[in-house]
Amino acid sequence: MSRLSVFMVAVLGLIVASFASLDLQWSQFLSLSAMQAMGRFVAEFFPPDTQPAFLMKVGLATLETLAMSALGTLLAVVLGLTLAWPAARRHAGDWAPLRTPVRWLLNFLRSVPELVWASLMLISAGMGPFAGTLALGFHTAGVLGRLFAETMENAPAGPAEALRTQGVRPSLVFLYATVPQVLPQCLSYTLYRWENNIRAAAVMGVVGAGGLGQMLAFHMGLFHMGKTATILAAMVALVGLVDLLSNLARRALTR
């Protein structure tokens, strides 16, 4: 049996074990009483609050959430690229003594959820969007740093080897041979993580990190369902806008 077959059998066994170990009450979830309760809850969201003063607050919170996600992603790109350089073995003979410890650091950064990072940042930076921005930056740096390092390692070795045999310094080899090959893939990863950070920024507001999430936690906690519906609509519109911009950017990169 091939390794792929063994792997697929193991994954299938894990899926079966997951269904067997979890208490999935499908009959209760799909019951008539559950559907009616969910319908009543959804009906409370209508009509959304469209008062001009409240819409202004939502608009400002939307811009704050967008700024948090953009700045957090930018910080993550800078930190991720800085850590990806020592975390990657750029050619077969590269010793890369820092590869393992830096990869451990990247694993730590991305293993800690954004909400935990936000809670830690709130202690040092106080409540507000700054804490959320730092939390997004640290968590996303772990994700992008690992992706950037893998991209560098998987880049075709021909152009870099040609420069290396001519005695070009490693930094210039990286700049003129590796970067042009990995840049489109790294930009694609960055745009994808920016989309994810929009959602994460909205959720982190629940712990007081600002933006739409903070408004959502406040008004939903007070059962202001009309206002909650307006905030949710703003979140959906913001994610859709960023997704559209990301798709346009990807198309421009692939032309």
Image (tube, helix red, strand yellow):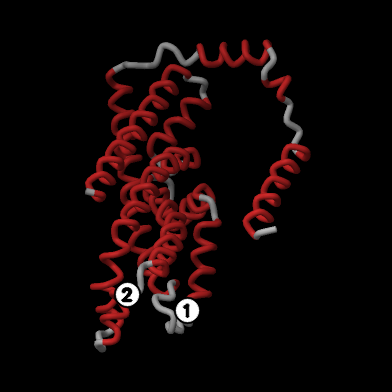
Q: Nearer the viewer, residue 193 or 71?
A: 193
Residue at which label 2 appears: 158
Identified by mark 2, the residue type is Gly
**Residue denoted by label 1:** 98
From this viewpoint, is residue 83 visible? no
Q: Position of residue 71 (x, y in %)?
A: 31, 51
Task: Report the amino acid beneath label 1.
Answer: Leu
Task: Tell which tag, 1 or 2, sits nearer the viewer.
Answer: 2
Residue 223's place in the image compared with 146, above or below, is above
Residue 50 on image: x %, y % = 33, 16
Give the position of the N terminus as an image quadrant: bottom right
Q: Quadrant of residue 227?
A: top left
Give 250 or 243, whichever is nearer the viewer. Answer: 250
Q: Secondary structure at mark 2?
A: helix
Q: Position of residue 211 (x, y in %)?
A: 38, 38
Q: Is residue 97 visible?
A: yes
Q: Residue at x 40, y 45 (%)?
A: 197
Give the Cα distance between marks 1 and 2.
24 Å
Residue 221 image offset from top left, x and y in percent: 53, 27
Left or right relative to 100: residue 232:
left
Q: Is residue 227 left or right of residue 105?
A: left
